[in-house]
Amino acid sequence: MSGTVPNSPAGAPPRGPRETIFEIGSPESTCVTAPDLDVPDVDLAQVMGGAVRTAPPRLPHVTELEIMRHYAHLAEMNFGVDSGFYPLGSCTMKYNPRVNEDTCRLEGFTGLHPYQPAQTVQGALELMYGLAQALGEISGLPGVTLQPAAGAHGELTALMIFRAAHESAGDPRRKVVIPDTAHGTNPATVTMCGYETVTIPSDGNGLVDMDALRSVLDTDVAAFMLTNPNTLGLFDPNILRITDAVHEVGALAYCDGANLNAIMGISRPGDMGFDAMHINLHKTFSTPHGGGGPGAGPVCVTEALSRYLPGPVAVSFDDGTFGLDWPDASIGRVRSFHGNFGVLVRAYTYLRAIGASGVREAAEQAVLSANYLKARLNGVFDVPYDRGCMHEFVLSGARLKRETGVRTLDVAKRLLDHGFHPPTVYFPLLVEEALMIEPTETEPLSALDSFADALIAIVDEARSNPDLVRGAPYTTPVRRLDEARAARTPDLRWRPSSA
Amino acid sequence: MLARVGVEAVDELFADVPEQVRFMGALGLPGPMSEVDLVRHLRDLSAANVPATQLVSFAGAGIYDHHVPSVVDHILRRPEFFTAYTPYQPEVSQGTLQAIYEYQTMICELTGMDASNASMYDGATAFVEAALMACRVLRRSSVVVAGTAHPEWLETLETYAASGLVEVRVEESHDGVCDPERMRALCDETTAALLVSSPNFFGNLEDLAGLGAVAREAGALFVVAANPIMLGVMAPPADFGADIVVGEGQPLGGSMSFGGPGLGFFACREAHIRQMPGRLVGRTVDADGNDAFVLTLSTREQHIRREKATSNICSNHALNALAAGAYLAAVGAEGMIGIARACVAKAHYLRDALLATGRFKAPWNHPFAHEFALVYEGDASQMHDEMLSRGYLAGVLLEAPDGRDLVLFAVTEKRTRSEIDAFVEEVASL
């Protein structure tokens, strides 16, 4: 491969695999020790009723320097938004402003115990109240809970609210309808809420097929879940007809808010006729994804549904103070305490930084960037649903695969050698060899152009030297992994014998 | 950019958004702020709080004020970790993946279990997922739960149970610990699991041997919720036949942060890993034969299985798991045992001293670890307020099963003998 392998982004050879933390250090090494015991010692076996440990847990023996070097090495094997362009569709990998990381670490926030008296947490409650108000305003759905820990958790919370509303109306229902473009969490959530999933196909334009929807809507349908704009990046122009049809049979309309970044400040789900939505603070409101979490998935609902919200919710009193309250028909708790508060502080910081005008500008720029990138790549790849896209778009690698044998997966892996994180691939399911690209508003034009140039170069490589692309990546810390082996013989923990 | 797209104005890009749903007004939000003003505003909000960390705090009840070693936050601040997405592209995610694999190993070491997942949202949701997993494993429909578990975990379980996926039977009558015989009486052929917490919400240690035997007789799984710091000195739940061990991992390097984000840890036996919820990281090899890590057994998960997935969860609390791994590496076994021992010794010291004042009575005398409940002989709420004005967070106020006011005290290694002595002296003088 010499001469054809692009350099790694930093220009330096990447750090390769490293031994686990259990294999470094030495038995006598320590980092942080317990404080000296300044009270009389206790006989643990006596005070704890004999349930004491006989053998210590086998934890690492390392010095502080060894820990820092270990994690520095691990960090260098990771790719984050700070490393480079991260156009992961439906994930909104926008820049994570550093001021958020500072404000969330103020001791007045990190040092709060969840059961402190209300008069000692007024600032925290004011922040939560203000964030909830802002999310209610942006969504057009004024009832807000900040409790859910993630988008999927928010979906579940919303369906629980729908269930409670239907049941309290004496009209329990059994089915939830989703389109075939839905995120996998939607049907999984439906099952977890004890409902049955009914999937309908999209129409020829990648939008909700009104006939298909009407054919499954009946009085046993509890809800219709829709991502709008959907996972093809398309805003459904029939949205009002859709929510009307859902409401006509007494069902409720749920908006998966994964794609809110495209429309915030431009169109509000509440005005589209949705009864509830979740918002991913870790997508739209710039809080970091953290390598998988923690995020936060607040849920916004109509005035009518707000009595079912999980508790507690932050409220303001006439005297200017803040407190926690329970809605009168609350579904109960969906987790412990008050939500992922540290994430809420970051999102609040972001919203105050960009303000009302910044909300709309972010959406406009996100949509413009996506359309620009789509224009640059149209023809290089096929655009199966070619109409004006919102903040993301989906390409198909089917033609490339047919002509060269190079699959979308290979293209994605080759992008790593060019210094880019790949887009979401093989989703949505209705597009063959899909590449789902979401640039976000925070990327400069130069990043969009470099990415388009890289994809064009990879298509050329696929035609001239398909094996090169099929063998990628070459410059990453590790090469392609044997995933089948991982699943066949699971090795889920380190053991001394496996060293 | 507009020219390349072929439009004259950005507004044209929103042509699919019907006029009727265009938002034409101004959002009722404040305007943008400069960083100077922004930081001042957030500092003001922060300063409107009195954090427990600036008080002499004895508050626990699920969230604990342990020392967080400096290394932990320095690791969390590496942007390669915190600005990354879920590690779907393992070639450029080895850092996150290996850190989680190491975390999974440490959770197995603490709990004695065979496998840990990559973490869940918090202790409450891990508790619920354990109940749902037990129902899947045994194809049964109900669980029997100790009423001494954290009340917010019980409430969360009840909320999820309203979906009809699991019937929850809570053994409510207790005197600080749950009675295995009463738990047995609630079991029948539909019972998929016995769920207990030890230390329980009141700090007391449950009879895990007795409860484990009840679970086995019922043919049910035994689910134990544990405190991860106390696992430094307590026998791992696996020793008592636990099939699933869960808990709140915040004490492992997490700040209290008003109760979130936390860390739900979740571990089980090898036989059940394919029914486990959540992410799992496994070790394999790459194309060059090098050891490497990857998300595995994902055919359990929503993006593949959709409505047949083991859970709808599609994330974990990776950054909190990273913190927990770094914490456990920093303290090591020796530090952990020392920390746990200090917490237990100081808690027993405080309890003895409070009882000696005559102002508190013991509602029960069970073995406990680093947290205990006492009855205050007087107006507990007034006492709590008064001590707050003197710079103390005098535990968490609760209602006892018999209706009496209880005060729940937790003591961590951060409290010094002189702080404890001064607190006892002041509370005795009220």
Image (cartoon, coloured by chain):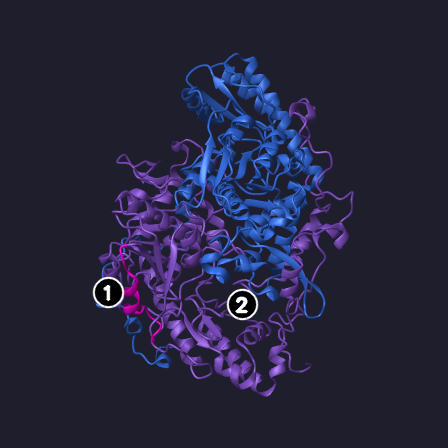
Chain colours: A purple, B blue
Question: Is residue B100 left or right of B382 when viewed as pictured?
Answer: right
**Which residue is denoted by mark 2 in the rendering?**
A84
Question: Is residue B80 left or right of A113 when viewed as pictured?
Answer: right
Dot 2, crowdedness within 10 Å: few (<14), some or many (≥20)?
some
Q: Chain of mark 1?
A: A
**Which residue is denoted by mark 1 in the rendering?**
A241
The disc labelled 2 sits on which kind of residue?
Answer: Gly
Residue ID at (57%, 45%): B266
Q: Secondary structure at mark 2?
A: loop
Q: In this picture, which residue range is highlighted in magenta?
A: A204-219
Asked which quadrant contains residue B384, the reply is top left
Q: Which residue occupies the foreground of this view, A447 or A463?
A: A463
Rendered-image quadrant of the C terminus of chain A: bottom right
Above-or-below relation of B307 to A13: above
Above-or-below relation of A390 to A219: below
Q: Position of residue A284 (x, y in %)?
A: 40, 59
Q: Which residue occupies the foreground of this view, A255 or A177?
A: A177
State whether discs 2 and 1 lie on one chain.
yes
The disc labelled 1 sits on which kind of residue?
Answer: Arg
Above-or-below relation of A68 to A400: above
Q: Position of residue B198 (x, y in %)?
A: 58, 32
